[in-house]
Amino acid sequence: MTFEVTQEDIRTGRQGGCCDCPVAKSIRRVFPIAEVDCHYIYPFGMHAAPVIRLPIRIETWVMHFDSCNQFLHNLEPFQFFISAESFVAI
């Protein structure tokens, strides 16, 4: 499954708000009721299966987005892929 973080997601994303960051915005285009934290996607809400582990590089991107204002000026749109192996049993 491929997700696309657009320039609009980056522009309107909120630092420190896992559910409103650019990555979460891209995920909600596929899973409209998804909840997202810094490590996992809950496509059907926090208390429903499945849970999907974010790729490490996306976790790192989110941490940089949340912590560094200088980082925000150089952000480009990107895509990321989540494989079936990223699904976690709860």
Image (spheres, rainbow, N blue to C red):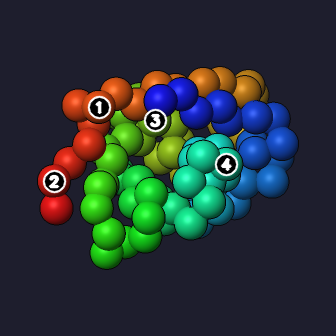
Which of the two marks, 1 or 3, is nearer to us in this view?
Answer: 1
At numbered mark 4, what does the secondary structure look like: helix, strand or loop?
helix
Q: Earlier in the sequence, mark 3 or mark 4?
A: 4
Give the residue type at disc 2. Ala
Residue marked by disc 3: 58
Q: In the rendered image, which quarter is residue 48 located in? A: bottom left
Residue marked by disc 4: 29
Give the residue type at disc 4. Arg
At numbered mark 1, what does the secondary structure look like: helix, strand or loop?
helix
Return the x and y of residue 3 as percentages of the image width and height. 58, 33
User: Looking at the image, do the residues carrying marks 3 and 4 touch, with CB atoms under 8 Å apart?
Assistant: no
On residue 16, the disc is none
Q: In the rendered image, which quarter is residue 85 located in? A: top left
At numbered mark 3, what does the secondary structure look like: helix, strand or loop?
helix
Q: Earlier in the sequence, mark 2 or mark 1?
A: 1
Horizontal placement of 48 versus 32: left or right? Answer: left
Please, which residue is most extreme toward the left here?
89
Q: Which residue occupies 37% across, 72% down? A: 46
Q: Quadrant of the C terminus?
A: bottom left
Residue 16 visible, this orientation: no
Q: CA distance from mark 2 to mark 1?
A: 12 Å
Q: CA distance from mark 3 to mark 2?
A: 20 Å
Q: Which residue occupies 56% across, 66% down? A: 33
User: Looking at the image, do the residues carrying marks 4 and 2 touch, with CB atoms under 8 Å apart?
Assistant: no
Residue sitting nearer the eye, 83 or 12: 83
Q: CA distance from mark 3 to mark 4?
A: 17 Å
Residue marked by disc 1: 84
Return the x and y of residue 43 as percentages of the image width and height. 45, 57
At numbered mark 2, what does the secondary structure look like: helix, strand or loop?
loop
Residue marked by disc 2: 89
Return the x and y of residue 18 as percentages of the image width and height. 53, 61
